[in-house]
Amino acid sequence: MSEILSISQLNITPKNDIHRFLVKQVNLKLNAGKTTCIVGESGSGKSLTALSIMGLLSNQLKATGNISFQGLAINQLDNQSMQTIRGAKIGMIFQEPMTSLNPVLTVGYQIGEPLTTHLGLKGEALRSRIAALLNQVGIPPERADSYPDELSGGQRQRVMIAMSIACEPALLIADEPTTALDVTVQAQVLTLLDELKTRMNMAMLFITHDFGVVADIADDVIVMFRGEIVETGTREQVLNYPQHPYTQALLDCVPDVQGLKTLKPIDYAWLNHGAIA
């Protein structure tokens, strides 16, 4: 099994308060052709972990530890060196495509930008590759001349996916890419991502708060609570045999299809004083 990314002892703190941990002692490994889901509530450190991999943390934050991508310590690189990796070897799909896409540029131009920057494509070769990518994500190639506000939410998300895989990265980070989509479109996007991961043998880090998504696409699962990893395991282990009380508390909040399950609120007081020291 080919290891693509390894994170060890990652801590993220505000620069003006290095004793307040936003992410604490995070360790994880990602392998080619596998999807690892990070699940947890808003504010649990999921997105900060992803942004630290991309070297996109706010200037007000400080990250320590080691992030190794294909054997290279990328957290030690300067921004210019990271720019050769972002988009080319590591792709990222952000949460909200309408704020991530430039409203005054056509989607074709935006898909083509990483192809020009990293692969030097231009002219007919560039147009052909853009058309192929749009086809790959299920959008008619003629929509390359459309602007983001002329597309539906699902189409905009597919454009983001096309941009993120344009250079066939070894690692794809998807930060809650289906949150704003309806159930039918969400299922289509998840199927597409899973197919692309298998076809390109990518490692995929999928950030979500939805255990339904985890059940659909995860190979391995990481559960985060207040900046720390509290449980890891295969999808089957975490969903069927949760070991940590917080994981069980999250699962207790998920309704069943029949609507017969009694949903339980998370008892944070108990977690703070009992489950997590």
Image: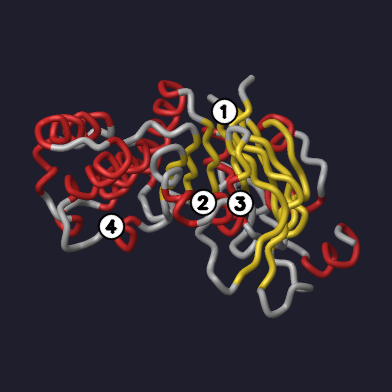
Dot label at residue 14: none
| Crowd rating for badge 3 (residues with CA inside 10 Å; few <14, some 14–19, many 20+) | many
| Crowd rating for badge 2 (residues with CA inside 10 Å; few <14, some 14–19, many 20+) | many
Of the numbered discs 4 and 2, the one sitting upstream in the chain is 2
Of the numbered discs 1 and 2, the one sitting upstream in the chain is 1
Residue 243 place in picture, x, y as percent? 82, 41
Render colour scheme: secondary structure
For disc 3, the marked residue is 75
- Whether residue 178 is visible, yes or no, is no
The answer to which of 276 and 67 lies nearer the viewer is 67
Label 1 vs label 2, nearer the camera: 2
Q: Secondary structure at mark 2?
A: helix
Residue 123 place in picture, x, y as percent? 10, 36
Of the numbered discs 4 and 3, the one sitting upstream in the chain is 3
Label 1 vs label 3, nearer the camera: 3
Label 4 – label 2 distance at C-alpha = 18 Å
| Crowd rating for badge 4 (residues with CA inside 10 Å; few <14, some 14–19, many 20+) | many
For disc 2, the marked residue is 54
The answer to which of 8 and 206 lies nearer the viewer is 8
